[in-house]
Amino acid sequence: MRFETKAIHGVRTPEKGVENWGNTINLATTFPIKEYNVMQEFEYSRVMSPTRKDFESLVAQLESGKHGFGFASGMAAITSIFTMFKAGDHFVLGLDIYGGTFRIMNDVFRQFGFESTFVDMTDLGKIEAAIRPNTKAIFVETPSNPLLDVTDIRGVVAIAKKHELLTIVDNTFMSPVLQRPLELGADIVLHSATKFLGGHNDIVAGAAVVNRDDLAEKITFAQVAMGALVSAFDSWLLLRSMKTLKLRVEKAQANTLKLLDFLRSHPEVEKVYYPTAPDNKGKTIQESQAEGGGSVFSFTVKSEEKAKSFFENLKVALFAVSLGGVETLVTHPSSLTHTEFPEEEKVARGVTRTLIRVAVGIEDADDLIEDFKQALAK
């Protein structure tokens, strides 16, 4: 089945001899034991539940994977994945990375003996140079947040295989509609399912997908042991939302291209950051590993005061964190999503007080352009 059909018909739950084509929900926390001293698939919902199983099956299919896992949030997914490692292990991550990922590695896991090196992920030479004898994995987020730098996934995979490392890719920004890292050789794909998979800003969830049975066994253990699971109700909402995933992602990307055309010629806009922008050095790589640049971009204005005025005068788009929903959201990375980074590091990386990140929704594109126009004019 092709992607759109798979998203709608990929999970059909047989129940009492009847195949249910619609989403079914089972909220039970425990299940009757059918036979003494014989294990069964559903015993206790922290271990496995029918509705979570359906979500995990579908997200695995959409990511071209074999094993899917549902978590309570994107950070719960990342935290659970890293429990596979031990004190003294070293990891290579990107400089321009989500603040929550930086926080968990720098402020939490470091206390337990993990070591991390943050490098420019657009430079494969710097990635390889950061590898140590105790390095265990390379963590990729592409395009990056919030400067939309592009990492060559195939190139990272080649380096990882050469050094017998895992390649972990956060695919939240692209969604499996536009980019499927497992097809490019990655070992683990992660999502904040709160974003595009959920798509309506009403679910907090996370997901992981792998092809390897040995990794699946380790992640299953972490999932059961830590219990940072997506609930049955949220699994059901995700199954509903993913039926329209491709439609939403493609509409938001089309809106993004129109909005970018407007902003590039606006006198108050200094620079635009987008994966397939002509001045993005990763443009060719992005086009080779993804089906478009997505619906998240950033731009800078001429002063912090102008940025403040822009946020305050929007009438359609919302001044809020997050992305991937049907609503267009604009945010201020320096003061909201990237507060964990030291100020001098943020400025050095380009996350300045004049930087605005936009997560485009599926509203009418002309309404968004008019909204941005009047907000910039105030």
Image (cartoon, rainbow, N blue to C red):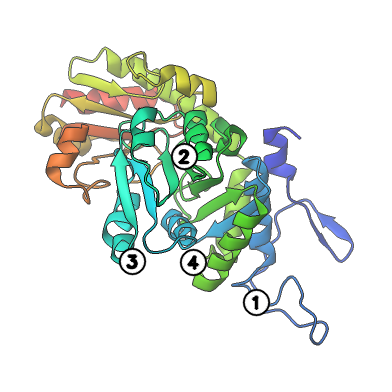
Q: Nearer the viewer, residue 2 or 113?
A: 113
**Where is residue 333, by image quadrant?**
top left
Residue 159 spot, x, y in % from top left: 47, 34
Total labels: the figure holds 4
- Residue at mark 4: 228
Real-space Cα separation, disc 3 to disc 1, in angstroms:
30 Å
**How much space separates mark 1 and mark 4, taking CA atoms?**
14 Å
Categorize mark 2 by other alpha carbons within 10 Å: few (<14), some (14-19), many (20+). many
Q: Which secondary structure lies at badge 3?
A: helix
Query: Which comes before the other along the chain, label 1 or label 4?
Result: 1
The mark closer to the camera, 1 or 2, is 1
Amino acid carrying mark 2 in the image: Val
The type of residue carrying mark 4 is Ala
Closer to the camera in the image, 235 or 281: 281
The C terminus lies in quadrant? top left
Residue 112 is tagged as: 3
Name the N-terminal-most of marks 1 and 2. Answer: 1
User: CA separation, marks 1 and 2?
Assistant: 35 Å
Where is residue 228? Give x, y as percent.
49, 66
Q: Which residue is mark 1?
A: 44
In the rendering, at what x and y percent does residue 99 appear? 30, 48
